[in-house]
C-alpha cells in the first residue's frame, strides 16, 4: 500500500490498486447504504470521490459525523467511476480521522464566499478552490521565473533585504530599528543610536546591489521580497511584495526590452501549458475572456512608443481624463490603460521619459531632457515592468546625483562601478503580484499573495 497525492491519482494511477489518501473533507452526501465523500489534499483543483459503505466498522460512529473541514485518511481500492464528470473513485475499506472541524464554528462551507470575507481568515482561505488555485499558480510561476533565467545563462544573486541606501530616492522606506537594550555594552552605556551604526531600512529594490554582480558576472537576477512604506490602500498596492529584477552587463535599452518581452511571454505560455486546470477556474468565474487575453500577449510583438508620442496621443484623445496630460508629468493609471486597452489593445512599451520624473541611475539621453527608461503596460492592469539602461558614465552620474542632492559618499561603492571598468548595462523589475493579478484576472492584489501587508493591516 502506498501514499498518493490526488493529482496523480486522478491522472495516472492504475485501477484496482489499493491506495491511501490523506486530505480534508469538502462535502459528504448520504445515500441509503453508503456515503459519498469529496476529499481534497491541495495538490489540484479537483476532489477525489470516496465511496464509504455502511459495512465499514465505524460508519455510524465516524463516517456519518464527518463534516466539511475534517482531516482524514482513507484507504481503499481505486475503481473506474460510472458517474459523469469523474474518471475514478476510491472505494473505502478504512477511514480514520486526524482532526475534527466543528460545523457550528468552521467558517468555510460549500458555497461561494466573497474575497473580502476570505481576506479576514487568511489562515483558512487556501482551502478554498480559488485561493488554493492561486497558491499553486504562484508556486508554478516562481519555478518558471528561475527556469527562464537559468535557461538564458543568468546567475541568481541574493541581494540584501536590509539596506542603508534608497534606490528610488522616494523616501518611502520602512526604518529598521532594535530594542534599546541591544544598543548597550556591558557597562550599560548606550553603544550607538543605530543597530548597524547608521540608519537602515527595508529594501524597495535589489537593483543597485544586483548591478555590483552584473559588473562582475555578466547577467544576474534577484527574486525576493521588497517593501514600500506608501500610504496607499488601493487594489494595486501592497506594503510587502515580490520583485523579479534581472541586470545585464553590455546591454542597451533595446536589448533590455527584448528580454522583458521574451520573459513575460515565457511566463504566460508556462501558466497556460502547465496550470490549465487551475486557470480554467478563473476563466469560468472571473473573466470569461481570460484565455483570449493571454493568447494575445504571446501571439504578437509588443508595441513600442516614446513618452513624447504617448503624450501626443493622449492629448488628442476624445476622453476627459481625471488627471491632465502634459509633457513632463508622470503618466497615471488611467492614461496607461487608455493607451494599451483603447489605442493599441495589446501590451505597450513606453520609452524615453523625462529625466526629472525618473531616478538618478537612469542613463541620460543625448537630448539632455529624457532618460533611457522603459515601462511595459498590460491591458486590464497598466504598468507591469519598469526598467532602464543605467548611467555608466562616471561624470554624468555624479552630476545627476549632485543635481538631486544625494550624498556621494553614501554611494561611493556605486560610483566605483563606473570608475573601475565601467560598461553599458541595463535591467528591469517585474512586480510578481501584479503579474499574478494579470494572469488570474483577480481584481485585488491582496488575493494573490498569501499574507497581504497593507497600511493598517498586518495579520499573522
Image (cartoon, rainbow, N blue to C red):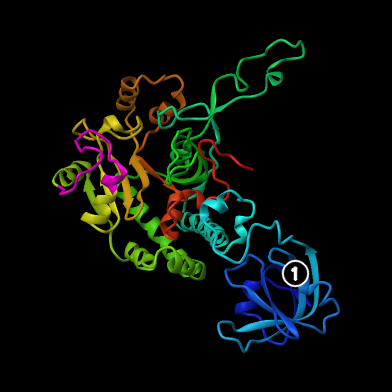
Image-quadrant location for residue 158: top right
Which residue sits at x=42%, y=42%?
A: 234
Q: Quadrant location of the N terminus?
A: bottom right
Q: Quadrant location of the C terminus?
A: top right
> Compared to 28, does 333 lie above or below?
above
Which residue sits at x=21%, y=31%?
A: 369
Whether residue 432 can be seen here = no
> Compared to 58, does 263 lie above or below?
above
Which residue sits at x=77%, y=70%?
A: 65
Q: Looking at the picture, tell me which residue is in the foreground, 249 or 453.
A: 453
Range drawn in magenta: 317-336
Q: Position of residue 421 (x, y in %)?
A: 39, 33
Q: Main secondary structure of the magenta part?
A: loop
Q: Looking at the picture, tell me which residue is in the foreground, 367 or 336.
A: 336
Q: Position of residue 263 (x, y in %)?
A: 40, 56
Instruction: Work out which residue is located at the far bottom of the displayed protein and give it.
Output: 82
**Residue 325 magenta-drawn?**
yes
Mark 1 sits on what residue?
66
Instruction: Work out which residue is located at the far front of the displayed protein and give it.
Output: 104
Q: Position of residue 268 (x, y in %)?
A: 41, 62
Counting every numbered tag in the picture gives 1
Instruction: Work out which residue is located at the far left of the displayed protein and give it.
Output: 316
Which residue sits at x=36%, y=40%?
A: 425
Label 1 crowding class (10 Å Cα cut-off): few <14, some 14-19, many 20+? many
Q: Position of residue 406 (x, y in %)?
A: 39, 21
**Residue 434 magenta-drawn?**
no
On screen, residue 319 versus residue 169, left or right, reads: left
Q: At numbered mark 1, what does the secondary structure look like: helix, strand or loop?
A: loop
Amino acid at each position: 500500500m502506498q501514499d498518493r497525492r490526488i493529482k496523480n491519482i486522478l491522472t495516472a494511477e492504475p485501477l484496482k490498486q489499493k491506495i491511501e489518501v490523506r486530505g480534508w473533507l469538502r462535502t459528504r452526501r448520504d445515500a441509503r447504504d453508503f456515503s459519498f465523500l469529496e476529499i481534497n489534499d491541495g495538490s489540484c483543483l479537483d476532489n477525489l470521490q470516496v465511496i464509504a459503505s455502511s459495512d465499514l466498522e465505524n460508519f455510524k460512529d465516524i463516517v456519518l459525523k464527518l463534516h466539511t473541514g475534517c482531516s482524514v485518511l482513507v484507504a481503499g481500492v481505486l475503481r473506474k467511476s460510472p458517474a459523469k464528470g469523474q474518471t475514478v473513485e476510491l472505494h473505502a475499506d478504512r477511514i480514520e480521522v486526524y482532526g475534527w472541524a466543528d460545523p457550528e464554528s468552521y467558517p468555510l462551507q460549500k458555497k461561494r464566499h466573497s474575497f473580502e470575507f476570505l481576506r479576514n481568515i487568511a489562515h483558512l482561505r487556501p482551502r478554498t478552490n480559488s485561493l488554493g488555485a492561486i497558491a499553486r499558480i504562484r508556486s508554478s510561476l516562481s519555478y518558471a521565473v528561475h527556469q527562464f533565467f537559468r535557461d538564458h545563462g543568468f546567475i541568481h544573486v541574493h541581494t540584501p533585504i536590509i539596506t542603508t541606501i534608497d534606490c528610488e530616492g522616494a523616501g518611502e522606506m520602512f526604518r529598521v530599528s532594535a530594542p534599546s537594550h541591544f544598543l548597550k555594552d556591558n557597562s550599560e552605556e548606550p553603544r550607538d543610536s543605530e543597530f548597524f551604526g547608521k540608519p537602515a531600512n527595508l529594501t524597495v529594490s535589489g537593483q543597485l546591489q544586483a548591478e555590483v554582480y552584473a559588473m562582475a558576472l555578466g547577467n544576474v537576477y534577484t527574486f525576493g521580497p521588497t517593501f514600500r512604506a506608501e500610504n496607499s490602500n488601493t487594489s494595486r498596492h501592497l506594503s510587502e511584495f515580490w520583485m523579479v529584477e534581472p541586470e545585464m552587463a553590455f546591454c542597451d535599452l533595446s536589448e533590455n526590452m527584448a528580454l522583458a518581452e521574451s520573459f513575460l511571454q515565457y511566463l504566460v505560455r508556462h501558466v497556460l501549458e502547465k496550470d490549465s486546470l487551475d486557470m480554467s477556474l478563473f476563466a469560468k468565474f472571473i473573466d470569461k475572456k481570460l484565455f483570449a487575453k493571454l493568447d494575445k500577449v504571446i501571439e504578437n510583438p509588443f508595441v513600442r512608443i516614446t513618452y513624447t508620442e504617448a503624450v501626443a496621443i493622449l492629448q488628442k484623445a476624445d476622453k476627459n481624463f481625471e488627471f491632465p496630460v502634459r509633457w513632463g508629468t508622470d503618466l497615471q493609471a488611467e492614461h496607461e490603460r487608455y493607451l494599451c486597452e483603447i489605442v493599441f489593445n495589446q501590451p505597450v512599451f513606453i520609452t524615453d521619459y523625462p529625466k526629472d520624473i525618473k531616478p538618478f541611475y537612469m542613463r541620460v539621453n543625448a537630448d539632455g531632457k529624457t532618460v533611457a527608461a522603459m515601462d511595459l503596460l498590460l491591458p486590464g492592469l497598466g504598468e507591469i515592468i519598469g526598467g532602464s539602461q543605467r548611467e555608466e558614465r562616471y561624470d554624468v552620474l555624479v552630476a545627476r546625483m549632485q543635481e538631486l542632492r544625494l550624498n556621494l559618499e553614501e554611494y561611493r561603492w556605486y560610483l566605483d562601478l563606473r570608475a573601475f571598468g565601467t560598461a553599458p548595462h541595463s535591467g528591469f523589475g517585474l512586480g510578481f503580484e501584479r503579474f499574478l493579478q494579470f494572469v488570474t484576472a483577480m481584481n485585488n492584489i491582496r488575493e494573490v499573495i498569501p499574507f497581504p501587508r497593507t497600511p493598517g493591516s498586518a495579520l499573522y
